[in-house]
Image (tube, rainbow, N blue to C red):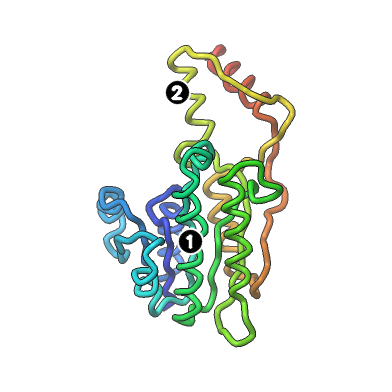
Amino acid sequence: MTNVLITGGTGSLGSQLIPAFLAEGYFVSIVSRDPHKQAIQQARHPEVRYILADIRDRERMFRACENQDIVIHAAALKRVERGDTDAREYHSTNVGGTLNVAEACRMNGVNKAIFISSDKAVEPVNLYGMTKAIGERVWLAENSPYSITKFSALRYGNVVESNGSVWHIWQRRIEQGLPLIVREPEPTRFFLSLDNAVSYVQFTIKHMHGAEIFVPASVRTFSLWELAREMQAQKYWE
């Protein structure tokens, strides 16, 4: 049986990966630091191994990665605006925590290790994007001809159904009768569903050889201005 560990396993992506991996016959373990979310997840999937830990704890990550074949590193601080006000926390988790997970994978001889990155790691304009860009670099740097562990990264965009997405924030504002605020109308963003995200992870596991950054093709793109207009128009016609 293949053993797979998901850091950030109670998050939006992790919660979708669990049933997908169980359906493939994997034994699934997750790492997260919220016992309440773990309890909810455990009620749905009691066959999963739950590890209460913070990725910033190097020793705990070493223990969590023992006897694992695949590690999906999805844990991160992701609220873009908080990165600029809580820079130390974002660096400690998104960079320091990533180093801990990578080292734990290498020292335990994990076969495949995948870092879940972001489109914001490309030419980053905020601290969150910078930490993801550094995370990619330090993760891929762990590849070595003397190690059996293969490290790759999967970079994708904004998951529509994820916690804290602009979709949910604007939906609440519309329900409250508040205006939608768009700072710049020109930039476009990449959008995909959680099912798409799970498929990309599965594709990466199957095709990775180490040191690649996987960038999904044919991801839908549109501007936030267009999204705001469509969401308001839909509410109007309802």
Q: How many marks?
A: 2
Q: Nearer the viewer, mark 2 or mark 1?
A: 1
Write down the quadrant of residue 25 in the picture.
bottom left
Query: Is label 1 in a helix, a strand or a loop?
Result: helix
Q: Within 10 Å of the Cα at label 2, are there few (<14), some (14-19), or many (20+) other Cα atoms?
A: few
- At x 53% / y 49%, what residue is drawn? 195
Q: Which mark is residue 96?
A: 1
Q: Position of residue 89 (x, y in %)?
A: 44, 49
Left/right placement of residue 56 relative to residue 197 reads left
Left/right placement of residue 197 relative to residue 213 reads left
Q: Nearer the viewer, residue 162 or 101?
A: 101
- At x 64% / y 19%, what residue is drawn? 229
Q: Position of residue 167 (x, y in %)?
A: 53, 31
Q: Which mark is residue 172?
A: 2
- At x 47% / y 77%, what residue is drawn? 69
Left/right placement of residue 183 relative to residue 176 reads right
Amino acid type of disc 1? Gly
Q: Position of residue 170 (x, y in %)?
A: 51, 25
Q: Nearer the viewer, residue 95 or 66?
A: 95
Q: Residue furthest front?
A: 88
Q: Position of residue 164 (x, y in %)?
A: 46, 36
Mark pair 2, 1: CA separation = 34 Å
Q: Mark 1 or mark 2, which is nearer the start of the sequence?
A: 1
Looking at the rendering, in which quadrant would you find the N terminus?
A: bottom left
Write down the quadrant of residue 104 in the picture.
bottom left
Q: Nearer the viewer, residue 12 or 8?
A: 8
Query: Is label 2 in a helix, a strand or a loop?
Result: helix
- At x 61% / y 42%, what residue is drawn? 126
Q: Which mark is residue 115?
A: none
